[in-house]
Image (cartoon, rainbow, N blue to C red):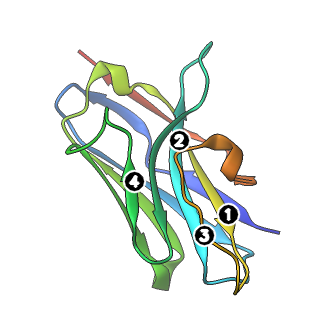
Amino acid sequence: QVQLVESGGGSVQAGGSLRLSCVVSGYTSGRYCMGWFRQVPGKEREGVATMDSAGITTYADSVKGRFTISQDNAKNTLSLQMSSLEPEDTAMYYCAARFYGLWDWIQCPLAEANFPSWGQGTQVTVSS
């Protein structure tokens, strides 16, 4: 069973930086799509960034140039480096993953429905 555990959230002032990490375990495939999503109470979960096993990345327009998604395969860790944070970035951030078989077509959209495995979330609060 795939498990994802996020860490690194916290409180920061506008313009500051945070780095989120997600340790992934229990998977058996080296072909995958992983991503970061965020959610504010009362709103739908929003895709922030995704990365597939080929290293192809996708970002939401709202975070392009400020956030960077990366992976450390040796540590089974997905990271999200967030810089120039804005109060609008305040949300609960979730790590998500989907693993593919050898002959599957890998799709890696910023779409919640694409991901069957989720972490518990880590809170990010940005004050003005």
**On the rendered image, what quadrant is the N terminus found in?**
bottom right
Numbered disc 1: secondary structure? strand
Q: Earlier in the sequence, mark 4 or mark 3?
A: 4
**On the rendered image, what quadrant is the C terminus found in?**
top left
Numbered disc 2: secondary structure? strand
Numbered disc 3: secondary structure? loop
Which residue type carries mark 1? Arg
| Of residues 118 and 21, the one drawn nearer to the viewer in this rendering | 118
Residue mark closest to the camera, 3 vs 2:
3
The crowding category of the residue bearing disc 1, from other C-alpha atoms within 10 Å (few below 14, some 14 to 19, many at least 20), is: many
Residue mark closest to the camera, 3 vs 1:
3
Q: Earlier in the sequence, mark 3 or mark 1?
A: 1
What residue is at 57 percent from the left and 65 percent from the top?
Answer: 33
Which of the numbered marks, if any, corresponds to residue 58?
4
Residue 23, horizontal then vertical, whole percent: 57, 66
Which residue type carries mark 4? Thr
Which residue type carries mark 2? Phe
Cα–Cα gap, marks 3 and 1: 9 Å
Which of the numbered marks, if any, corresponds to residue 37?
2
Residue 102 found in image quarter: bottom right
Q: How many marks?
A: 4
What residue is at 61 percent from the left and 84 percent from the top?
Answer: 30
Which of the numbered marks, if any, corresponds to residue 98?
1
Q: Earlier in the sequence, mark 3 or mark 2?
A: 2
Which residue type carries mark 3? Ile
Which residue lies under the disc numbered 3? 106
Q: Earlier in the sequence, mark 1 or mark 4?
A: 4
| Of residues 101 and 96, the one drawn nearer to the viewer in this rendering | 101
Residue mark closest to the camera, 1 vs 4:
4
Q: Earlier in the sequence, mark 4 or mark 2?
A: 2
The crowding category of the residue bearing disc 3, from other C-alpha atoms within 10 Å (few below 14, some 14 to 19, many at least 20), is: some
Q: Earlier in the sequence, mark 1 or mark 2?
A: 2
